[in-house]
Amino acid sequence: MRVVVQDNLWFSGPPGYANYVLNGRPMIPVEPLLGRTGSSDATAKSQELQWLLRYTGRGGTGLVVSQEWIRPGDEIDRNLGPWLALFERHGRRAKWCVFYDPVLAVKQRGLGQAIPFDFSSPELLAMWRSDLDYLERYFRRPKYWQLAGRPVLYVWAVHGGIVNAESAFAEADDRGLYVLGDVLGGRKEPPHMRGVTGFVSAVPGIVKPGDRREMAELLPELEREFGYWASRGFDFYPAASLQYDDTDFQLALGSDGQAPVRLLAQSRDELRATLRALRRSALSDVVVLGTANGWAEGTTCLPTARNGPEFGGVRIGHYRFAHLEEIGTVLFPGVPVYEGPRLSIRRRSPSKVTLRLADVDALARVRVRPRAALLGERVRSGFERRLFVEPGARVKVRNLDGRKATLEVG
């Protein structure tokens, strides 16, 4: 099983929304466990990647990270290089791909404001071709995700955000790309969909502004929607978010906003039901699952701070690690469940002991007593760590989920 999760390299909020605040109002429903980190915080991004890898099969075998990309040289593009260095060192068997946002690509370059955008216009076709030329540097990277032997270009809002894209997608096909189209907005098939070789269906396509439901109520309709698109002859990859709550974002937008949408899970059982629906609807071994850090809409799977109950309210709960844990349990059955940090002795000499630290968070609290007994540390591929201590040391580790381990080095 492959789980595609969208990530964003603007850690403190979408471009222009500093620290997830807009018009003086907070725009996120829950606080990230790591806080509202800045876009240069590589340590926080390390920890996020480690969590995603931990719950998606052995060594992250089942993980595909789709990184949002808008235009060359912007904040996201500048952050992509350092993130790729991190991902390619620690990702082992995980993959990644570009999540291309044509709507923001057009808006941020001043080429239009009114959606949908006509991708048959010479101006937008030229932008598309230039972007494909630029993105070629990423398509050739060693861990880039492929389907049918082709690099995947995941394109957002092909159903509603853009129109008349036949020529644009045909050109991508001629370049050997696999275009995976993200569908929003119902069942109407615009003509340009013929050029999309891949296909996903998303929860927002079957809800309207102001919709407030439990995910359990939504699931029958969601599965009918999956069945419809699976019958249309596309390569079909079902997609959903485990929860959705854009209340604060819409209120912060003020007169530019719309009625908020709340699609909430009231228990872990409802999370599992959504994940099982995705598994049942998959025609291949690929499902698409919300975002890692789209905090403004509550579509996240990364952990939240413990600021209230996990589930059961009229707003999205402070679910902590529940989303990640249930992804691991339901989508990767048979893979050992993470139980906490593991410490063991790898090598010993009269003056130095080498310890192996597995499943230890990048931001874990690691204490060696006495302090002088710590001789050094090294982080290996896959976030495994080596600790070098003197004989007789005592090592204590506490991960961010509260799980602990202690080792007395005799």
Image: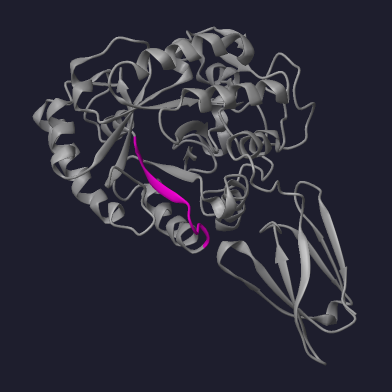
The one nearer the camera, 18 or 117, is 117
Q: Is residue 259 visible?
A: no
Camera-side residue of 189 and 293? 189
Q: Is residue 32 highlighted in magenta?
A: no
Which residue shows up at 35% across the image and 47% down it? 74
The residue furthest left is: 122
Residue displayed at 65% across by 33% down: 323
Report whether 183 appears left or right of 209: left
* Residue nearer the viewer, 51 or 212: 51
Provide the residue span drawn in magenta: 90-100
Spot occupied by residue 166 in the image (x, y as percentages of width and height): 15, 26
Q: Is any atom of residue 213 visible in this view?
A: yes
x and y, in percent, of residue 35 in the image: 66, 43
Q: Position of residue 327 (x, y in %)?
A: 61, 36
Count of all numbered marks drawn on residues in the image: 0
- Find residue 190 and report its horizontal and vertical position in percent: 23, 14
25 over 292 or under it: above or below: above
